[in-house]
Image (tube, grey):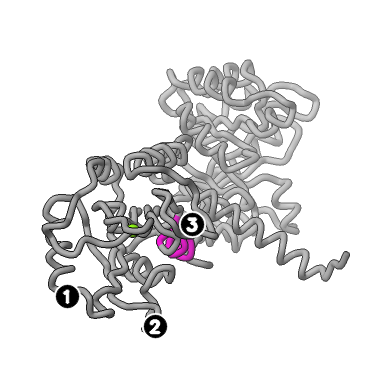
Amino acid sequence: MGRASMSSGRRAVFLDRDGVLNRALVRNGQPFPPASPSELEIMPDTAALGELKELGFLLLVVTNQPDVARGTQKQEIVDAIHNRLKAVLPLDDIFVCYHTDADHCDCRKPKPGLLLRAAEKHGIDLAASYLIGDRWRDIEAGERAGCKTVWIDYGYQEPGPCHGPAIRVQSLRAAADWIVEHTQEGQRGMPKSLSALKIKLFADGADKCAMVQHYANPQIQGFTTNPTHMRKAGLTDYEAFARDVLSIIRDRPISFEVFADDFREMARQAHKIACWGENVYVKIPVTNTRGEPSFDLIRQLSYSGVKLNITALLALDQVRDVACALAGGAPAYVSVFAGRIADTGRDPVPLMASAVELLRPHAGLELIWASPRELLNVFQADSIGCHIITATDDILKKLSLIGKDLHAYSLETVRMFYEDAAAAQFSL
Ligand SMILES: [Mg+2]
């Protein structure tokens, strides 16, 4: 992983000094630093820095001051200028390179050393950070460090940046405005973190190793299985598998399904499965294969204290009838297959929101958003107050992508295509 894909850490705006924070003295079209604190003129629009600060950015100055190495300036004077800047501007830190190109240091911009040192010291996420500068060396350093760069172009008589910038502006005010807008644009539609969600996340599957792994993750608050998963996992002894899993997972709900088609046999299997553990929920399909509703069986089992997970619902009238059959019985789940609804071209969100309302009067009943198709469904389900979402491994694997920086993700995608093409040894 390169620096650009780092996703944790604080955000910073790196600021060049002369021409950005204070006026550069321009002679023959070239900018020069003030020679002393008395020559220091703070830019009129530095109030914009306060707005960046309010957005949570650290303000870090990165400045080349080669006159010290050249012997035409004293480091004490540079320090005095910086003390003055720190006194009047909301700066968090100042990083200075005193070298010339001849010193071959790693910090003189366009090298990114000052930014990297600052990132190390303050724990900065460079990919989420910005640099504002007025010369090509600034922009180049920012680009090399993986930041987004803003070039204040004063029309100096010198070449502009070759790489970047993300945007060219004419003032610090415009630079700050662009960063504010760019940041907010990036955050619109930004998901909450998983821990900020109310919905419970269940793992759906029948692979014991995966289940044990998920059990180690406190974010996975329950488990569901079904005969299709079990068959895929190559299981032949249903009870042995269930008891094996239940010997490890004892304190989080786990659903096992009956597999008969006759209601009396379903009832027998349900009572047997319910005995396997306190945390067991018995899955009963909403109808048998002839389409006959299971409501009577559901009512009977629920009233006898069997915790149920009624499965394979796709329509709202089924939710209403199942809620009615479960009302006043043992705690139960109602699994609506939102993903299968989506597969028919219908938006499942309004239907699921109505299902939440239908279950609301019944304290012991919880709605499961079953068969999600993408990670986004976790957030959709949470936003309508759905109690539980149950997801297969392919979706759970994407949890680490929540809130990932889209530019970093784009870069990873480009690299994936490149590496796959290389691995396939294509030639044209
Ligand atoms: Mg400058």
Circle nearer the N terminus (2, 1): 1
**Disc 2 packing (10 Å; few <14; some 14–19; many ≥20):** few
Q: Camera-side residue: 84 or 371?
A: 84
| Residue designated by label 1 | 74
**Disc 3 packing (10 Å; few <14; some 14–19; many ≥20):** some
Question: How far across and down, in percent of the image, does residue 113 sit?
Answer: 38, 72
Question: How far across and down, in percent of the image, does residue 357 sit?
Answer: 48, 18
Q: Which residue corresponds to the image point at 54% horizontal and 41% vertical from the top-left? A: 281
Q: Which residue corresponds to the image point at 68% horizontal and 30% vertical from the top-left? A: 342
With respect to residue 415, does 251 lie above or below? above
- Which residue type does callout 3 highlight? Gly
| Residue designated by label 3 | 160
Magenta segment, principal secondary structure?
Answer: helix
- Which residue type does callout 1 highlight? Lys
* Inter-mark Cα distance, 3 to 2: 22 Å
Residues shaded magenta: 138-147
* Inter-mark Cα distance, 2 to 1: 19 Å
Q: Which mark is residue 139?
A: none
Q: Camera-side residue: 144 or 157?
A: 157
Circle nearer the N terminus (3, 2): 2
Q: Camera-side residue: 144 or 282?
A: 144
The quadrant in which residue 335 appears is: top right
